[in-house]
Amino acid sequence: MSVVLKKKESEKINEMNSESVRRINTLHPSLVSPALNIFNECMRMEIPIYIVFGARSTQEQDFMYRFGRTVPGKVLTQHRGGFSAHNYGLALDFCLRFNSSLLTWTEVLDRPYWKSKWVKVIQLFNQQGWTNKVNDPSFEPGHVENLLGHTIGELYEDAKARHNWNKDI
Ligand SMILES: [Zn+2]
């Protein structure tokens, strides 16, 4: 019985790791291999990182933006479509997992062992030029981004011109 459960648990963990890798692969081509290296480094250091989000479309972003505003629920993002680094494949959201259960920042905050792992993930990203915008009003503890030297405004204007966006924001 317990052997079966263990097998199931390890299959679940493998599946979660594959999900993380798939999400990393949605990133901007310049960020895929650096992010995979960080992911592998976490695995090596026994930091059970789980990638919750990679790139998302501006439509998905607009959908998320409605939560906690025009749609009841928790506010999920501070950014409208086109104004999140995720819309350009330049951001990842992560959390940790204990076996196959997810641990969010609020759950690790008072647990030094887990909190130190979380902080270590951010350090690994920081070392590769990513930021988690700790001083920004839209700070989210599990969000890291790398704008590759651009600003969100530049990326937005560029995408707007290329895709003929007609958004009134
Ligand atoms: Zn994010």
Image: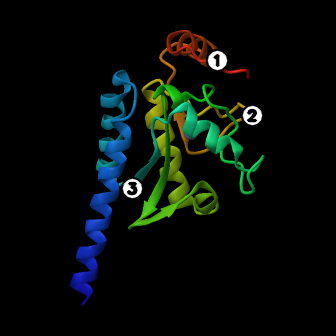
Closer to the chain start, of discs 1 and 3, is: 3
Q: What's the distance in space between the residues labelled 1 and 2, CA to CA? A: 27 Å
Q: Which residue is mark 2?
A: 137
**SS at mark 1 in the image:** loop
Q: Which residue is mark 3?
A: 48
Looking at the picture, which amino acid does disc 2 mark? Pro
Task: For the N terminus, give its image quadrant.
Answer: bottom left
Closer to the chain start, of discs 1 and 2, is: 2
Mark 1 or mark 2: which is in front? 1
Tag of residue 166: 1
Q: Is residue 4 or residue 112 the one in the foreground?
A: 4
Q: Residues within 10 Å of mark 1 (few under 14, many from 20)?
A: few
**SS at mark 3 in the image:** loop
**What percent of the width, then of the height, locates residue 87?**
52, 29
**What percent of the width, then of the height, locates residue 44?**
29, 48
Mark 2 or mark 3: which is in front? 2
**What percent of the width, then of the height, locates residue 146?**
49, 25
Looking at the picture, which amino acid does disc 1 mark? Asn
Q: Furthest-bottom residue in view?
A: 1
Residue at 29 percent across and 43 percent down: it is: 40
In the image, is 157 to the left or to the right of 33?
right
